[in-house]
Image (cartoon, rainbow, N blue to C red):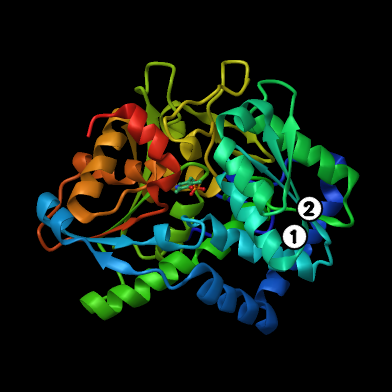
C-alpha cells in the first residue's frame, strides 16, 4: 500500500487545505515552493549540518537489554530524547526556519499548548537571530511557567490568547489571525503533522530523518533494515510519522501508533482520537477528530500535555482507516507505570508522552526473534513535577 500525499494534499480521504480565503496567498506560496526548496543542495547541506552539530544527530539506536528480556523480543530504542532541547520537535523547527529564510520571511510565529513546540521554535529563532512571537493560551501560560520562561530567555515574545477556553485552540486562532494580517514578512511554524496542506507532509519530511537513521543503524546492528514492529506515541503524530516514513511501503513492518486514553476511553476524559473521533475538519485539514453530535470539538484530556489534542494528523487518519498502522490506547496510569519501569530497567526517564508508547508493549505479544523499535520521542526532565505528583515509585 502506498502512503503518499496527492497534489491536493490528501492521504486517501484525509488532508487538504480548509482555510479562510484570506490565508490562500500564504498557503499557496508555501505549497508552490516547499518541495523545490527542500530539494536544493544548499538547503539540504545546511539542514544536515545543523541536524548533526546543533541537534546532535544521528541519535543512537540503542538495544535495551533488560527491557528486551522482560518482553521476550529484541527491543531497540531510537533515542530522540538525546536531541538538543530533549525531544524530536527540533528536527522540524530547524527545517522550517531554513524554509522561512529561503522564502524571504523575516519573522516567525508559532502557537504552543504545553510549550514544547514554543521552546523548539524559540530555540531556532535565537539560533538564526530571527524575531519570534509565540501564542499561548492564558491558562496554559499559568500552567507551564518553566517553558514560558525558557522561551523568554531565548528571546521570544510570548503572547497570551485570552479568548475561549484560553488554551491551545485559542492560541492557534490568534496565530492564524496574526498570519492573515502579516502575510508577506512572516512564516508560521506548525509543530506537528497537522494543519492545512502542505504542512503535514512538510513536517513529516523533516521528521523522516528518524526512520532514515533507523534503517541504517538496524542494518549495522542486525544486518537488516527492517524491524518487525515500529512503535510510537501519537499526539498530532509528528514523531510517529518520522519513525514510520521510510517504512510506509514495507508491508513486513507492522506500524504501531499509541494514543492517550487519559482516565479511560469511556470516562469522558480521554484523547484517543481513533477510538472516539469522527471525520471532520480541524486546524485546516480533514481528519479524525473528537467532536459532539453537532460537530463541536470536544476538549481532550491526557496526563501528558503533548498528547492532549482532539485530533490526529491526516496521514494517521489514513493509516488507521486503511489498517496500515495498528492503533492502541493507553491510560494515564498505564503510561506512568511504564515510565517508571523504563527508568528502573534502562536508566532512562522518558517524557510522559513517550511512556505511552512503552505501555503498548503490555498489550502486544512477541516471538523471541522479533525486532521491535520504539521511538523514544523525548526525555522526562520536563515532566518531573507530574512524576512527583503521581508519586507511586
Ligand atoms: C510534543 C511531543 C509529542 C507529541 O507530538 P507528536 O507530533 O505526536 O510527535 C510526543 N512526545 C514528546 C516528547 C513531545 O514533546
Locate residue 10, reporting x and y percent.
Answer: 61, 51
Say if 239 sits above or below 252 in the image. Answer: above
Locate residue 325, reporting x and y percent.
Answer: 37, 49
Locate residue 124, reporting x and y percent.
Answer: 65, 61
Q: Residue at x 69, y 69 (%)?
A: 35
C-alpha separation, residue under disc 1 versus residue under disc 2: 6 Å
Q: Is residue 63 left or right of residue 146?
A: left
- 172 or 250, nearer to the observer: 172
Quadrant of the drawing holding the N terminus:
bottom left
Q: Residues within 10 Å of mark 2 (few under 14, many from 20)?
A: some
The answer to whether the residue bearing label 1 lies less than 8 angstroms from the nearest atom of ligand 1 is no
Q: Secondary structure at mark 2?
A: helix
Q: Residue at x 21, y 60 (%)?
A: 64
Residue 263 visible at all: yes
Residue holding disc 2? 27
Q: Which numbered disc covers residue 315?
A: none
Q: Residue at x 44, y 48 (%)?
A: 319
Residue holding disc 1? 31
Say if 30 sits above or below 361 in the image. Answer: below
The answer to whether the residue bearing label 2 lies less than 8 angstroms from the nearest atom of ligand 1 is no
Count of labels shown?
Answer: 2
Q: Are marks 1 and 2 in contact (CB under 8 Å)?
A: yes
Q: Is residue 251 left or right of residue 272?
A: left
Q: Residue at x 69, y 61 (%)?
A: 126
Quadrant of the drawing holding the C terminus:
top left
Q: Secondary structure at mark 1?
A: helix
Say if 132 sits above or below 245 in the image. Answer: above
Locate residue 346, reporting x and y percent.
Answer: 21, 55
Q: Residues within 10 Å of mark 1 (few under 14, many from 20)?
A: some
> In the picture, residue 58 is in which quadrant?
bottom left
Q: Is residue 247 left or right of residue 129?
A: left
Residue 190 visible at all: no
Amino acid at each position: 500500500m502506498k502512503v503518499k500525499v496527492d497534489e491536493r494534499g490528501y492521504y486517501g480521504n484525509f488532508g487538504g487545505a480548509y482555510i479562510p480565503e484570506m490565508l490562500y496567498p500564504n498557503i499557496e506560496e508555501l505549497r508552490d515552493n516547499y518541495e523545490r526548496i527542500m530539494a536544493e543542495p544548499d538547503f539540504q547541506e545546511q539542514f544536515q549540518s545543523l541536524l548533526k552539530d546543533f541537534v546532535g544527530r544521528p541519535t543512537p539506536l540503542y538495544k535495551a537489554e533488560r527491557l528486551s528480556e522482560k518482553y521476550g523480543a529484541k527491543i531497540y530504542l531510537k533515542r530522540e530524547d538525546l536531541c538538543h532541547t530533549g525531544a524530536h520537535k527540533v528536527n522540524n523547527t530547524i527545517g522550517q526556519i531554513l524554509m522561512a529564510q529561503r522564502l524571504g520571511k523575516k519573522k516567525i510565529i508559532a502557537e504552543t499548548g504545553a510549550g514544547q513546540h514554543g521552546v523548539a521554535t524559540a530555540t531556532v529563532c535565537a539560533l538564526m537571530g530571527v524575531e519570534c512571537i509565540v501564542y499561548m493560551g492564558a491558562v496554559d501560560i499559568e500552567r507551564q511557567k518553566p517553558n514560558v520562561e525558557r522561551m523568554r530567555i531565548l528571546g521570544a515574545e510570548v503572547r497570551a490568547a485570552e479568548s475561549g477556553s484560553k488554551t491551545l485552540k485559542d492560541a492557534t486562532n490568534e496565530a492564524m489571525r496574526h498570519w492573515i494580517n502579516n502575510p508577506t514578512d512572516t512564516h508560521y511554524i506548525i509543530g506537528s503533522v497537522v494543519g492545512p496542506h502542505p504542512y503535514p507532509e512538510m513536517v513529516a519530511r523533516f521528521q523522516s530523518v528518524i526512520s532514515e537513521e533507523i534503517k541504517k543503524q538496524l542494518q549495522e546492528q542486525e544486518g537488516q533494515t527492517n524491524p518487525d514492529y515500529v512503535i510510537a506515541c501519537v499526539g498530532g503524530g509528528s514523531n510517529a510519522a518520522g519513525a514510520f516514513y521510510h517504512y510506509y511501503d514495507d508491508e513486513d513492518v507492522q506500524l504501531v501508533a499509541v494514543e492517550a486514553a487519559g482516565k479511560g476511553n469511556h470516562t469522558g476524559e480521554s484523547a484517543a482520537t481513533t477510538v472516539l473521533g469522527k471525520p471532520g475538519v480541524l486546524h485546516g485539514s480533514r481528519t479524525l477528530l473528537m467532536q459532539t453530535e453537532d460537530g463541536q470539538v470536544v476538549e481532550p484530556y491526557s496526563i501528558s500535555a503533548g498528547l492532549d489534542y482532539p485530533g490526529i494528523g491526516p496521514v494517521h487518519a489514513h493509516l488507521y482507516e486503511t489498517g496500515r498502522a495498528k492503533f492502541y490506547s493507553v491510560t494515564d496510569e498505564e503510561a506512568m507505570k511504564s515510565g517508571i519501569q523504563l527508568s528502573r530497567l534502562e536508566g532512562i526517564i522518558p517524557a510522559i508522552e513517550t511512556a505511552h508508547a512503552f505501555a503498548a508493549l503490555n498489550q502486544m505479544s512477541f516471538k523471541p526473534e522479533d525486532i521491535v523499535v520504539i521511538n523514544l520521542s523525548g526525555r522526562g526532565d520536563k515532566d518531573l513535577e507530574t512524576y512527583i505528583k503521581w508519586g507511586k515509585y
